[in-house]
Amino acid sequence: MGGEGSGGKRKGSGRPKGATKEPTQVIAVRIPLSYKVAVEKSHGSIGVWLREVIENEAAIWIDIPKKKKKKVYKESKEPAKPRTKRPQCSPDKPACHLLIEGGACSIEAPLFVPSQKGGEGIERITARYCLVDIADLKTSHNPLTGFGARPGYPKEAQERDYRLPAEERKVRAIAEHYAPELIFSTAPGALDGLPIATQDKLILGGNGRTMATLLVYAGEGGVPAATPKKYLLAHAKAFGFHRFEIERFKWPMIVRTIQTTSEVKTLAEWSRRLNASLSQQLDATRLAVSRARFVDEKVFAELANMGDDETLIEFVSSVRSKPFVRALQLSNVLDQRSAAQYLGFDGLLTQQGRELVAELLVAVLLPDADLLTALGVGRVAALARSASYLVQTQALKEYDLVKPLRKALRDRVTMLSGNYPTVKAFLKEQGSTLFAETSSATLGDPLAVLLLRLLAELDTSPVKLAKVTRRYLKIAKAPGGGQSALFASEAFTPTQALTLAAKEEAKLDLSTLAGLPTQKKPGKKKTKPAKK
């Protein structure tokens, strides 16, 4: 061995009998200072050799289990994200004072609606996210009891009647294809995202979405009943809530809470605003023109079942109009969403539905919203009364009045904008003869000129205009192609049929228009007496 304490080997040293072959480690041993200790490291083992304690200078081995290595945590390259606290609602914001009894309210909620002044702008409404049990919310109808009207809910506060089959189907369709990310979203518009409720838990916006969620919770949806709650637990922070707040409710629901009075008129105004889109809405005329493109031959064929002496209102109010209504649905003029508004329990058109059909037929006659607007409400209303008869002439080939009518309506708008007193004055300026090249739409088309004269005389007299067009249709539909039942021996041209109808029903002689050849009945030509 080297020097004492050098750690070298010496003769006779080694592992004693019975020592384990497992790796050992040195343990600290307190001994008198007079003792000397030699430490040897060999093959991962530590031998402790105590000299002068053992006379034969044999090494003493102490075997201990290997200590576990301590884990060393390396520093991450990315700094740890700080824990975020739940956003607080600032007391200086009016929305933060809104509360719902029995619920929990968090942060301010975004809510924008069309301007109350009727302009094109939008208005931000003070609202706050509140968490309640959906069973405590007051919807207009209860989907769990057959969509019966809910007691205590003001009937006038909700425009839609969910007892109607079509409206009920819409709610059930939402429940059947339930997508929680569409219901529980932070969308700022009232037509999307979370419903809107008063502090009294009265639902004013998102009525259908709320009822659909209630159906899902009750196990009547197309997804597991726990779907809404699971989604809220996973996204509670987005609305300023903790998971434990969601857990305390059996059927949790988040609404955007607003402050309003309980006056029925005020509630109705809110309901209307909350059901309007933020985007620019189509007015009734443009909506009708948009839908008119869906009207197909089946619709016209069913409309032809109107009686000759029957008005459109009389027809669509009778059970005989059901095939006509069905044709409107099949052509997608009345889709599933709008059907609830325009169809009653009996499958017939409601008052709004009847008005829609009249506007729709006018749009078929003239598919130009700007021209219809220029005509004015009164003239469009008169045209609407005659529209059902005029539309039916499309199937009568040369007796079709729709094409020449469009020309006449364009010239009528020009007359109104130019303050022409008469058709004669208008045509005189447009051209010296009927067939002159001009910007006028009617010149060159005798039937269009007759219609222009008819409109100038009767477009503010809806009853007379309807009588004339109905009479024309009856003459044109007579057996033999334009053969009147009153004049079975004579066949009339379209211009003759229109002139006759105007004279019979309105005592109006269209043939007196300057430049228009007078329509005379066929007869013997008079000859001058021969000179003597």
Image (cartoon, helix red, strand yellow):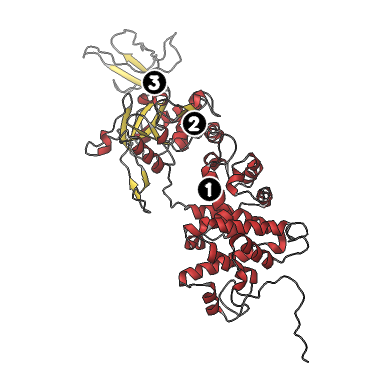
Residue 361 coordinates in the image, percent (x, y): 58, 54
Residue type of the residue flagged with mark 2: Ala
Q: Nearer the viewer, mark 1 or mark 2?
A: 1
In-front residue for pair 452/281: 452
Mark sitting earlier along the chain (3/1): 3
Q: Is residue 220 above or below residue 500?
A: above
First in sequence: mark 2 or mark 3? 3
| Residue under pointer 2 | 212
State left or right for residue 264 relative to residue 140. Answer: left
Q: Identify the residue position indicated by label 3 in the image.
A: 68
Q: Which of the labelled discs sits on residue 355, or is there none?
A: 1
Q: Residue at position x 46%, y 69% from top? A: 417
* 221 vs 124: above or below: above
Asked if one can make out residue 335 in the rendered structure from this viewpoint, the answer is yes
Considering the numbered disc 3 on the image, is that residue within a helix, a strand or a loop? Answer: loop
Whether the residues at callouts 1 and 2 have beta carbons within 8 Å, the answer is no
Furthest residue toward bottom: 532
Choose mark 3 or mark 1, whichever is in front: 1
Residue 35: image quadrant is top left
> Is residue 469 or residue 285 the one in the foreground?
469
